[in-house]
Amino acid sequence: MPDRRRNNSSSTPTLSEVADAANVSSATVSRAFSRPELLSRETVARVHSVAARLGYVPNHAARALSTGRIGNIALIVPDITNPFFAAMMRGGQATARECGYATFIGDSDETPEVEDILLTKLSAQVEGFIIASSRLHTKQILEHARKRPCVLVNRDIPGTVRLLVDSGPSYGQALEHLVSLGHRSIAYVAGPAFSWSNSQRYGTVTRRAAELGVEILRVPTSRPSFEAGQACVDELVLTGATAVLAFDDVMAQGIMAGLAARGLSVPGDYSVIGCDGILAPTLFPPLTSIATHCAEAGRQAVELLVAMLQGKPLAHKRINLVTEFVIRATTQAPRSQRAKAGLHRLTTTE
């Protein structure tokens, strides 16, 4: 088919020219860039190939004015450096690209006021939000959800669409594992005060500890970071605990470093368990941890948001993602238990 641009090679190619060259309608070209999920993969690939050859670039601003679709979504997280959120962002962004959306990332720095500002200012530039581990009050979240479609990750608010990484049962298994090794005084190094995940994990641990007849000692921290893990070690040692359940792997790594700086070994002097499972296999010794499938959480959250933007009825939808407790090399029987076992073996031998 003749190329309309031959007589005017300096002109900008139009949507109609791409349609003619690809032998499809103008509406199909528009959908290939704005709603690719409505077309076959072959058609989308052909349109994109022809557009690239002609040098066509879709006018997203014009499309937004005519259709109300901006083609952007936003993912708001409390700490962009945390491996859980980094993995979740990668999984979410990949899925968003497949669905034809660009992703804006907002880091609230564990600060509710910053989170509120990000949601307010970005609302004019995106079609919807994924809000991960929000630190806002429930009323504020509901106000933002009324303005733009929102999917909440790890915040359980009735009436919203939410995806929950359910680590509570795995923390129960982690506690049972420590008790089976002989630990009776166990520290829980806490996460942020407004964290839904922190409430779920601590609640599960305290309930199960009561059933098992063991002591849980809560050690507060300023935020879930390596530095906070290191800084809490003095208080941790003073509790007399022999094992630690940390809020996440990053804090567990900090705790292990802080213990090492005091000449204390893991698991020789303290057993340590983390959560998320991203850093865990790379540490030395490899960290016993809870795998939370962060990337999958990002993928499913974007799928939920895209479904909402397509008008699918998802009100009040609540999805739970299961987690797994993975034993590696940072847990063993407490030193006193091992000493008794050694004495018993010595006495039996004699």
Image: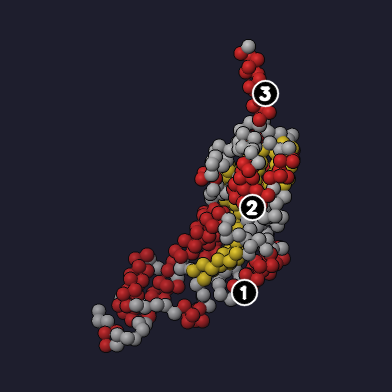
Q: Which residue is mark 3?
A: 340
Mark 3–mark 1 contact, CB under 8 Å?
A: no
Q: Quadrant of the N terminus?
A: bottom left
Q: Mark 1 packing: few (<14 Cα in 10 Å), some, or many (20+)?
A: few
> Which residue is nearer to you in this view: 302 or 268?
268
Residue plotted at (63% across, 31% down): 333
In the rendered structure, which disc, 3 or 2, sits on the residue that comes first in sequence? 2
In the rendered structure, which disc, 1 or 2, sits on the residue that comes first in sequence? 1
Secondary structure under the numbered disc 3 in the rendered image: helix
* Residue 131 image offset from top left, x and y in percent: 61, 63
Q: CA distance from mark 1 to mark 2?
A: 31 Å
Residue plotted at (55% across, 59% down): 301
- Which one is in front in this view, the residue at disc 1 or the one at disc 2? 2
Q: Which residue is mark 1?
A: 121
Residue 257 location, quadrant: top right
Residue plotted at (68% across, 49% down): 231
